[in-house]
Amino acid sequence: MFATAPNLIPATPAPRRTTAAPAMSLAGARQNELLRALPEADLERLFAHMDLVPLKPGQCLYDFGDELEYCYFPTNAIVSLQYINEEGATTEIAVVGREGVAGVAVYRGERASNTAVVTGAGYGYRLHAEALRGMFSEGGMLAQQLMRYTSSMFTQLAQNVVSSRHSSIDQKLCRWLLERLDRSIGSELKATQENIANLLGVRRESITASAAKLQAEGAIQCRRGVIDVLDRTILERNAGACYFAPRLAMPE
């Protein structure tokens, strides 16, 4: 045990680095592509009813059957839309990022047909259901964008059903990684192989083997709880139509 030198003032621990929360602003709201497509006047009206909220991994935004009070427009977060069966098994049926909105059924006044869970940390703009329904009933660009986005979500759901039946594990993993990469800033994805396996409804060993192949090809680099995408083109080539078909239906 070392003796303390006399009159020596102990060093002050370095302050812990924290990331400041973004300020709520119209510019921030425009980071969401659906909101950015709206005319300035429409966005300003919606903005008056919005809150900027942190979206944390594992946070449940709503459960299947819930009466939706809010919808969420992610700016840099990722939300997984899931179906959970009676045995508690979870399957991901779609994913939402800055291109869209979680809780799109709000404008139709319907209950939630899935469970929405945050899988990628970030922020989003939360909008009260009443405000959205009020503006949707007026028609205009907001109504058009929501209906187009709903159509694209149906395409994504249908493609995921086809993929679950006819795509290989390698294709499913590549598509899953690409969908996250599209909605992320940078090439680092925070995910465990066990979590990916659960969302895809496959065995963890299958994902481990598939990830090892992709790593050997130079497409990804796996670390503890993190996957670095090194070569997107390899993922796209391996995913094929499993990935590209839903993208063709996304609103521009």
Image (cartoon, helix red, strand yellow):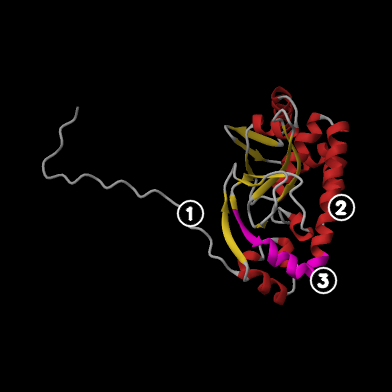
* Side of 23 relative to 41 (left or right): left
- For the residues labelled 2 and 1, the Cα–Cα distance comes to 36 Å
Task: Determine the residue located farthest toward the top in the rendered image.
Answer: 205
Q: Earlier in the sequence, mark 3 or mark 2?
A: 3
How far across and down, in percent of the image, does residue 189 sit?
Answer: 63, 42
Q: Dot 1 surroundings within 10 Å: few (below 14), some, or many (20 or more)?
A: few
Q: Nearer the viewer, residue 178 or 32?
A: 32
Asked whether residue 101 is in view, the answer is yes
Task: Determine the residue located farthest toward the bottom in the rendered image.
Answer: 41
Give amino acid for label 3: Gly
The span picked out in magenta is: 123-144
**Quadrant location of the N terminus in the rendered image:** top left
Quarter of the image for residue 58 reads: top right
**Rendered position, 172 above or below 41:** above
Q: Nearer the viewer, residue 77 or 143?
A: 143
Q: Which mark is residue 248?
A: 2
Q: Dot 3 surroundings within 10 Å: few (below 14), some, or many (20 or more)?
A: few
Q: Earlier in the sequence, mark 1 or mark 3?
A: 1
Asked whether residue 252 is in view, the answer is no
Q: Which mark is residue 139?
A: 3
- Residue on which the image places disc 1: 19
The residue drawn where x is 80% and y is 69% is 137
Give amino acid for label 2: Leu
How far across and down, in percent of the image, does residue 56 sit?
Answer: 57, 47
The residue drawn where x is 75% and y is 51% is 111
